[in-house]
Amino acid sequence: MKALVGILSITCVALVILLVFKPHENFGEPEAPEIDRSGITLFYNEIDEALNYPQILSAKIISESSDKIIFNITYYYPEQTEGETYNLSVHPDTGDWAYSGNEIFIGSRTIPITVSLRIKEAGRTLSESTVMYFYVNHYRDNKYIGKVFDQVVPFEKIWKKKGY
């Protein structure tokens, strides 16, 4: 009888452990809750007429999933000098993202920009970020000159590969 009680006790303890501490294929990695911040404007800036280079005026989230965000970025580009181009880019503070650079053109315009997860390390399915960078790079005769606009916005996200 004592043996039966012992076996039942061990079985109960094992069941409690399995129910409380569920095994997870990404053990040690944070959970990736599904968050959809669609429709949220992350920032809004007025046009500064004194600046003679492009400015990002606003960033609005159009859609968000576990592995991708689509922004509508509104910018103002006052004038163009021959041989000079500007590229607008958005990315999180993690190396696990796909390139998002876009050449911009004169005027006040709104363009969609997609930021996607691209994990380079085999076996990983999650990546964390805490901020989103919005910036405009300047090029002259196809040579990088530097950033002319830079805005950093707090943006916590746990990125997760599709299907995991």
Image (spheres, helix red, strand yellow):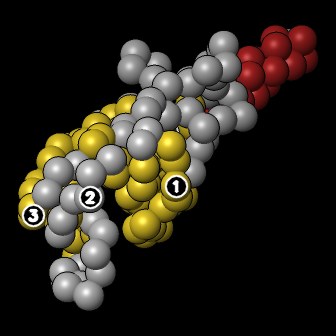
Precedes in sequence: disc 2 or disc 3: 2
Q: Position of residue 139 (x, y in %)?
A: 43, 49
Quickly name the residue at label 1. 145
**Residue in the image at 59% along x and 44% along y:** 94
Q: Which mark is residue 81?
A: 2
Q: Secondary structure at mark 1?
A: strand
Looking at the rendered image, the disc whose residue lies closer to the viewer, 3 or 1, is 1
The residue identified by callout 3 is: 108
141 w.r.t. 2: above or below? below
Which quadrant of the figure contains the N terminus? Answer: top right
Distance between the Cα atoms at labels 1 and 2?
14 Å
- Quadrant location of residue 3? top right
Question: In front of the other: label 1 or label 2?
Answer: 2
Disc 1 or 2, which lies upstream in sequence?
A: 2
Amino acid bearing label 1: Ile
As drawn, is 157 to the left or to the right of 126? left
Q: CA distance from mark 3 to mark 1?
A: 23 Å
1 sits to left or right of 60: right
Three-letter amino acid code of the residue under disc 3: Ser
Question: For numbered disc 3, what is the local secondary structure?
Answer: strand
Mark 3 or 1, nearer chain start: 3
Residue depicted at x 17% and y 51%: 105
